[in-house]
Image (tube, rainbow, N blue to C red):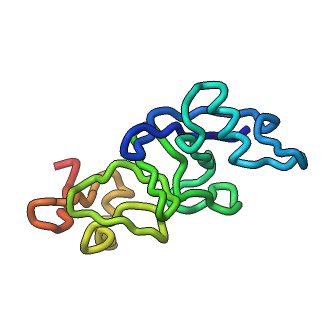
């Protein structure tokens, strides 16, 4: 089965559907995205170029079964298609965050959250605390939060 994202205005994904592989075969019997797009245009009366194939097994530019990642992320409703980089992007989590093309994910302007200390890890394991880092957009930093406090 193949999955296709239906694009609306500004490249927003408005629907994701499954297409039988037989509806994507070209004259040589090979799966072809453009054949699937033409099938979808005939079936749903929505322009062929507004249907983009997506991979159910791809997230953050990694194929969860070890295969080749395809288009950065599996498209979801509300995602945006980036034609230049051929990546489906989730909603930007914070105004300051930037695209990381290599991982097809959003990153804070200062990088990933810090690692937990050994003490925090042991407390999390013991069930005494639940530490988490939350992004603080106002300060542009990661805040350490004790969820059990």
Vertical relation: 82 (above or below) 15 = below
Vertical relation: 5 (above or below) 138 = above
Horizontal arrangement in the rendering, residue 126 relative to residue 14 (left or right): left
User: Which of these two is toward me, 52 or 98?
Assistant: 52
Image point 70% across, 40% down: which residue?
36
Find residue 75 and report its horizontal and vertical position in percent.
51, 45
Find residue 4 and report its horizontal and vertical position in percent.
60, 40
Quadrant in the rendering for residue 10: top left
Horizontal arrangement in the rendering, residue 135 relative to residue 26 (left or right): left
User: Which of these two is toward me, 17 or 124?
Assistant: 17
Find residue 84 and report its horizontal and vertical position in percent.
47, 63
Find residue 28 and report its horizontal and vertical position in percent.
90, 49
Total labels: the figure holds 0
Image point 84% across, 49% down: which residue?
30
Vertical relation: 133 (above or below) 110 = above
Image point 16% across, 60% down: which residue?
136
């Amino acid at each position: 089965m193949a999955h296709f994202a239906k694009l609306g205005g500004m490249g927003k994904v408005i629907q994701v559907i499954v297409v039988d592989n037989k509806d994507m075969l070209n004259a040589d019997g090979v799966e072809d995205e453009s054949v699937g797009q033409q099938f979808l245009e005939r079936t749903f009366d929505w322009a062929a170029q507004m249907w983009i194939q997506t991979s159910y097994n791809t997230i953050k530019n990694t194929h969860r079964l070890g295969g080749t990642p395809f288009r950065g992320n599996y498209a979801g409703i509300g995602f945006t298609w980036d034609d230049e980089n051929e990546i489906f992007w989730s909603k930007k989590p914070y105004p300051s965050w930037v695209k990381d093309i290599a991982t097809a994910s959003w990153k804070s302007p200062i990088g990933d959250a810090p690692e937990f200390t050994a003490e925090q890890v042991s407390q999390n394991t013991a069930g005494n605390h639940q530490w988490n880092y939350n992004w603080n957009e106002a300060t542009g930093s990661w805040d350490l939060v004790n969820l059990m406090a």
